[in-house]
Image (cartoon, rainbow, N blue to C red):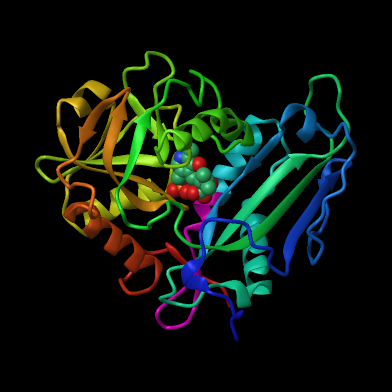
Amino acid sequence: MAKKDIAWESLGFDYVRTDKRYVSCFKDGKWDDGSITDDDKIVLNECACVFQYAQTVFEGLKAYTTEDGRTVTFRPDLNADRMIDSEKRLKMPVFSKERFLDAVDRVVKANEEWVPPYGSGATLYIRPYMFGSNPVIGVKPAAEYQFRILTTPVGPYFKGGAKPITVRISDYDRAAPRGTGNIKAGLNYAMSLYAIVDAHENGFAENIYLDPGTRTRIEETGGANIIFIDKDGNLVTPLSNSILPSITRRSIMYVAEKYLDMKVTQREITLKEVEEGNFIECGLCGTAAVISPVGCINDHGKEIRFASGMDEMGPTLKKLYDTLTGIQMGRIEAPEGWIHEIR
Ligand code: PLP
Ligand code: COI
């Protein structure tokens, strides 16, 4: 399969229109058969539930070209499961796991020329999403929906790729206690827009959100979970019911334990203990972020600097990064069921 003639190496994390997308509509209590279309426009009534009450959820995963030239996705079954959790929480009709997986395969296959070549540093980002589409003015769930998947080739989420970033402790919350922080709802990201623009204007790459109940514990950033390496070289990651259960983070925990023989702990992590220097490396992890090293956390002017410094990824995160991406790109044998080939 010939690839598109584009400068894959210089792609950032921006939308590029690809040729095909998937769409299925829900009406009169059922989903239609779904199809692949060229049309990238959506026409909706002005009072569609998504516009008035933000009834929309989404997912994010990637397609890779492996070293031996196969096109694969990474643990898409977990994205299907999480999307179903998100749909249920916003009272949307479930798009079944089987149909989700089939739709991802179909849309990637239809855009195979857009799946970046092996070694280019780019990947095809896959964005499944669902929204309430019929007019609603009283506050209630829509009766009609669209499930869609768009794809776009992407490079690194943070400028500079593997260069350590500086993030800050946010004064805002992205989730409420017992709110929607643990699902992938568009509203969580709307909540973060003011804070991310302000962070960028002040020279920070991302915001770290604290637990919304007490504001003493580390939760996650606007678009990624957080991992720490302690002084003994072990992996520690926050436990909280208001953060998104990152598929990347869950995979890293497994890789750390089973491939790298590290001790892995998921527990509440206070900002105070991070300030006290309990951790020597810090990273953000997610589909878009992969593993992005954090060199410094700024807490209202007070700098928490990690021993790994601002020049390169620390040695333990680098091992995790190499193992995870090695699995994704087919260089390292994957655990059973992690790599899904698209034929
Ligand atoms: N946390 C948030 C808020 C996110 O938006 C994402 C991205 O999907 C993640 C964490 C990472 O999740 P995953 O590894 O499943 O992509
Ligand atoms: C992802 O990593 O897939 C996300 O959805 C994060 C988003 C901030 C791009």
Does 126 sit left or right of 162 as displayed? right
Does 127 sit left or right of 169 as displayed? right
**Quadrant in the picture for residue 269:** top left
Q: Residue at x 88, y 35 (%)?
A: 46
Viewer-proximal residue, 336 or 164? 164
Residue 177 visible to an observer of this rendering: yes
Q: Residue at x 87, y 31 (%)?
A: 47
Q: Residue at x 29, y 48 (%)?
A: 253
- Give above or below for 216 relative to 237: above
Does 219 sit left or right of 90 as displayed? left
Does 52 sit left or right of 248 as displayed? right
Q: How many marks?
A: 0
Task: From the top left corner, tell me how far across and down residue 106 is, in percent.
Answer: 67, 68
The quarter in which the C terminus is drawn is bottom right
- Give above or below for 138 relative to 20: above
**Quadrant in the picture for residue 238:** top left
Question: In the image, is residue 94 part of the stretch drawn in magenta?
Answer: no
Q: Residue furthest top?
A: 214
The quarter in which the N terminus is drawn is bottom right
Give the magenta-colored segment's residue range. 64-79
Task: From the top left corner, tell me how far across and down residue 322 is, in percent.
Answer: 28, 63
Q: Residue at x 23, y 55 (%)?
A: 312
Residue 335 visible to an observer of this rendering: no
